[in-house]
Image: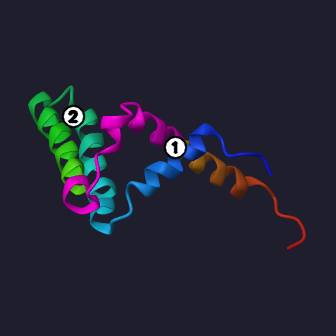
């Protein structure tokens, strides 16, 4: 088996920094959806978009400081959102590819 890639090591570190269930919810259930909605709303409601964007990050930072007791990964590695988004897309595509591939011997 080959050594894990730099992306794989980064994802492992990211997961290690995000283990508390409340912090996980503040990221996946609140912060990232708010930021995604902010991006969609930019042309229609720029002020709402700005509020959602900063509010989403505020919730995620709060999760780190209050529950994880660590510094948000984005402060150490500003490319974090892009790297994690790529890892999620890669994982989804890999899963879809496995679903589309015929299984033999079952």
Residue at the outermost right position = 105
Q: Residue at x 69, y 58 (%)?
A: 99
Q: Which residues are magenta?
A: 64-86
Quadrant of the image containing the C terminus: bottom right
Q: Residues within 10 Å of mark 1 (few under 14, many from 20)?
A: some
Task: Give the percent coordinates (x, y) of residue 16.
Answer: 44, 57
Q: Which residue is mark 2?
A: 41
Query: Of 26 and 101, which appears nearest the observer?
Result: 26
Q: Are there few (<14), some (14-19), or many (20+) residues within 10 Å of tag 2?
A: some
The image quarter containing residue 74 is: top left
Please state which of the two labelled residues, at mark 1 or mark 2, is closer to the viewer. 1
Of residues 11 and 38, the one nearer the viewer is: 11
Q: Residue at x 65, y 40 (%)?
A: 5
Quarter holding residue 37: top left
- Mark 1 or mark 2: whose residue is earlier in sequence: 1
Instruction: List x then y, in percent, for residue 54.
Output: 16, 38
The local secondary structure at tag 1 comes to: helix
Q: Which residue is mark 1?
A: 10
Q: Which element carries disc 2, helix, strand or loop? A: helix
Left or right for 31, reference 94:
left
Image x and y of residue 102, in percent? 81, 59
């Amino acid at each position: 088996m080959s050594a894990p890639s730099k992306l794989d090591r980064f994802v492992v570190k990211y997961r290690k920094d995000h283990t508390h269930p409340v912090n996980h919810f503040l990221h996946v259930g609140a912060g990232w959806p708010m930021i995604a909605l902010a991006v969609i709303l930019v042309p229609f409601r720029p002020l709402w978009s700005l509020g959602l964007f900063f509010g989403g990050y505020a919730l995620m930072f709060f999760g780190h400081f209050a529950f994880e007791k660590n510094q948000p990964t984005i402060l150490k590695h500003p490319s974090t959102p892009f790297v994690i988004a790529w890892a999620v897309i890669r994982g989804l595509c890999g899963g879809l590819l496995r679903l589309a591939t015929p299984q033999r011997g079952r």
